Structures are given as C-alpha cells and as structure tokens.
Amino acid sequence: MRVVVEAVDGRRPLGQVRAVLTGSAAREVGRLLSPGTSGTAVGGLRMCRVSERVAEIAGTLRRGARVRALAARAELVEGRWLLSRFHLLP
C-alpha cells in the first residue's frame, strides 16, 4: 500500500507501481496523482480476507490537516497479490 501512496503523492513514478496494480486500479491511481504533494501518510490500515484469493483493505490517508478514507481490494493472481481496486473517498 505504501508504494501506491508514494505514487499518488508524486514521490514514486506510476510506472514503478504498475506491477502491483491491475488495469482498473492503475487508472484510478493515475487519476488521483498529486505531484509535489508531501507529507502524505497512511494510517489505521485494516485487512479482511474475503476468500483464499481476495482481501479487502480499509484505512486513512492524511495530507496535512486533511484525512481521507481509502478502500482497496487485493486479489491473488498467478501467485502474486495485486491491487484490483483503489479508492480515496472525498
């Protein structure tokens, strides 16, 4: 999750993160890019295994004084965990 947040706030190129994202999650992360943002922190992550191959993740993303909820879904694909969904709530 940390590397995805680093891409969202511009500290890591999106290309470096695509290996852990499905196409739809990569598009969502690309839409959320905020280059030059600093001080972004992930907090309170919780994960729930929905099945052997699926996990849902919830947490918070803090940028300065603003805190947003995040939700993600990870799926086991060919032996690797990939984020298939990534959302920041307003």
Image: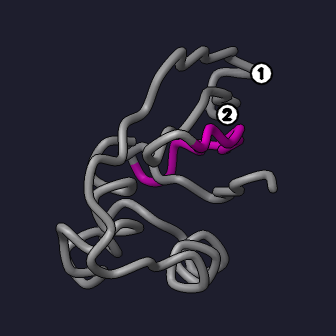
* Residue at 42% across, 33% down: 42
The magenta segment: 66-78
Say which mark, if any, is on residue 50. Answer: 1
Q: Quadrant of residue 18?
A: bottom left
Which amino acid type is shown beneath numbered disc 2?
A: Val
Task: Tell me the crowding category of disc 2: few under 14, some 14 to 19, or many 20 or more residues within 10 angstroms, Cα based.
Answer: some
Which amino acid type is shown beneath numbered disc 1?
A: Val
* Residue at 26% across, 58% down: 38
Residue for badge 2: 54
In the image, is residue 57 above or below residue 11?
Answer: above
Q: Secondary structure at mark 1?
A: strand
Residue 77: x, y in percent? 50, 52
- Name the residue nearer the viewer: 8 or 53: 8
Residue 75: x, y in percent? 59, 44
The answer to whether the residues at label 1 and label 2 have Cβ atoms under 8 Å apart is yes
C-alpha distance separating marks 1 and 2: 5 Å
Residue 13: x, y in percent? 21, 80
* Residue at 36% across, 60% down: 20
- Name the residue nearer the viewer: 82 or 16: 16
Q: Secondary structure at mark 2?
A: strand
Say which mark, if any, is on residue 21. Answer: none
- Is 62 in the magenta? no
- Is residue 76 left or right of 51 when viewed as pictured? left
- Name the residue nearer the viewer: 48 or 76: 48
- Is 72 in the magenta? yes
